[in-house]
Image (cartoon, rainbow, N blue to C red):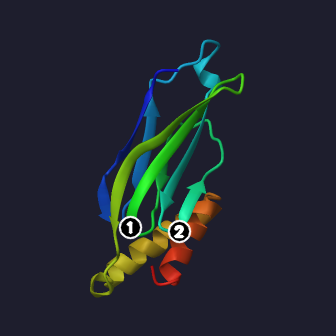
Amino acid sequence: FGGSCSVTPTVGTELVDDFRVVCKDWNDDVSTSQLRYQFGFTGADGEVLFGLSASPERALILPAGTISISASVQDSMGGITSVPTVGTVVVNQLAPSACGADVVLQAGSKLQKLARVSEFNNLAEASSTKLEGG
């Protein structure tokens, strides 16, 4: 295998900023096209894992708090290499005073995008955390 994973940015705002996780330079003895990736995060409410994907990157919308990002890479034979801590990010709470129309529209647009592309786990986590007052 022998690749690496990273997350950017390391500081952002909930429902506003996308946190992009990228895994690169991973290889399989058989074929790099057979690699599958799984991403997740752990915050105050526990761990959230997303399904396996052929894409080596993923954009996450995260709840407020200090969040640990994880990744796993699976080869064509089912072997898995885990990267338990890709990085730790600080996600600042969206301040009510900063909730002007443009910020509300931007956050709403991100949630709509998640719903449109079947990112239901990320949509549910992002919206339920905010609705619960997090």
Q: Position of residue 96 (x, y in %)?
A: 33, 86
Badge 2 density bin: few <14, some 14–19, many ≥20, Cα 10 Å: few
Q: In which quadrant is the C terminus drawn?
A: bottom left
Q: Residue type at mark 2: give it.
A: Asp
Q: Residue furthest bottom?
A: 97
Q: Which mark is residue 25?
A: none
Estimate how packed mark 1 is, as few (under 14), some (14 to 19) or many (20 or more) residues with alpha carbons within 10 Å.
Answer: some
- 102 with respect to 46 (left or right): left
User: Marks 1 and 2: CB-CB under 8 Å?
Assistant: no
Q: Residue at x 66, y 26 (%)?
A: 79
Identify the residue position indicated by label 1 in the image: 65
- Give me the residue at 64% from left, 63% from top: 120
Q: Position of residue 4 (x, y in %)?
A: 42, 30
Position above or below: 117 against 38: below
Q: Please report the residue visible at 58 percent of the width from the left and 20 percent of the height from the top.
A: 32
Q: Could you say which quadrant of the image residue 90 lies in?
A: bottom left
Q: Is residue 109 left or right of residue 92?
A: right
In-image side of 113 versus 64 (left or right): right
Relative to 93, does residue 8 appear above or below in the rendering? above
Residue positioned most to the top: 29
Compute the Cα span from label 1 to label 2.
Answer: 10 Å
- Check residue 45 in the rendering and tell me which mark sits there, or answer none: 2
The kind of secondary structure element at disc 1 is strand
Type of amino acid under label 1: Gly
Q: Is residue 9 above or below residue 33?
A: below
SS assignment at label 2:
loop
Residue 121 is situated, as x and y percent measured from the top left of the image, at 62, 61
Of the residues under marks 1 and 2, which one precedes in the sequence? 2
Q: Report whether 89 appears left or right of 61.
A: left
Q: Position of residue 18 (x, y in %)?
A: 40, 57
Residue at point 61% right, 51% down?
50
